[in-house]
Image (cartoon, rainbow, N blue to C red):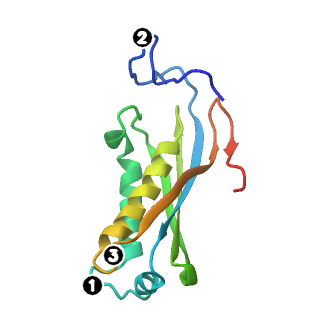
Amino acid sequence: MPQELSHIDEQGRARMVDVGGKEVTRREAVARGRLEMAPETLSLILAGGLPKGDVLGTARIAGVMAAKQCASLIPMCHPLRLSSVEIDFSADEPLGLLHISACVRAQDRTGVEMEALTAVSVAGLTVYDMCKAVDKGMVLSGVRLVRKTGGKSGDFILDGE
């Protein structure tokens, strides 16, 4: 674990890290999260039975758009040229769990972890928005980086993933 925060300068002020001298390498990050809901809500989503339309298709597009806009949302993120954003869902109907996964790739000077995390978060929030009329008790949780490759700091795999 690094001892210093790279986004804080010597005077304790927030700063954007200068990545200009870093080598361009292939970067990939995978993030995951889950949306907990009533099993009946998940059944409606999977059956396409909600009045707002294709919930998972819309959430997939929202996740891709969020990854592409990460630098506009998070102050110290660098704008990156993403080469791929994949959003996937898997359901555990009896438990009412919708698992969300985002894989983001780029050839760049800095990593795509924030883009993957943002994609999962916004995809989950989109599902919530489209389903809140039938289930206001949904909970988006467990958003985490599970894997990243590329860059000077090397690879990372979250224990248990």
Q: Amino acid at mark 1?
A: Pro
- Name the secondary structure under disc 3: helix
Q: Dot 2: within a 10 Å radius of its alpha carbon, few (fewer than 14), some, or many (20 or more) residues?
A: few
- Name the secondary structure under disc 2: loop
Q: Which residue is mark 3?
A: 131
Instruction: Name which of mark 3 and mark 1 comes first in the sequence.
Output: 1
What is the CA distance from the residue labelled 3 to the residue labelled 1?
A: 9 Å
* Camera-side mark, 3 or 1: 3
Q: Amino acid at mark 3?
A: Cys
* Residue 43 position within the rendered picture, expressed as x and y whole percent measured from the top left: 46, 86
* Residue 140 position within the rendered picture, expressed as x and y whole percent measured from the top left: 45, 62
Q: Quadrant of residue 149?
A: top right
Residue occupying image coordinates x 38% and y 71%: 137
What is the CA distance from the residue labelled 1 to the residue labelled 2?
A: 53 Å
Q: Which mark is residue 66?
A: none
Is residue 37 visible from the viewing direction of this image?
yes
Residue occupying image coordinates x 54% and y 83%: 93
Residue occupying image coordinates x 32% and y 84%: 50
Residue occupying image coordinates x 35% and y 34%: 75
Q: Dot 1: within a 10 Å radius of its alpha carbon, few (fewer than 14), some, or many (20 or more) residues?
A: few
Q: Which residue is mark 1?
A: 51
* Residue 104 position within the rendered picture, expressed as x and y whole percent measured from the top left: 52, 51
Residue 18 to residue 138: above or below: above
For residue 160, side relative to residue 127 (left or right): right
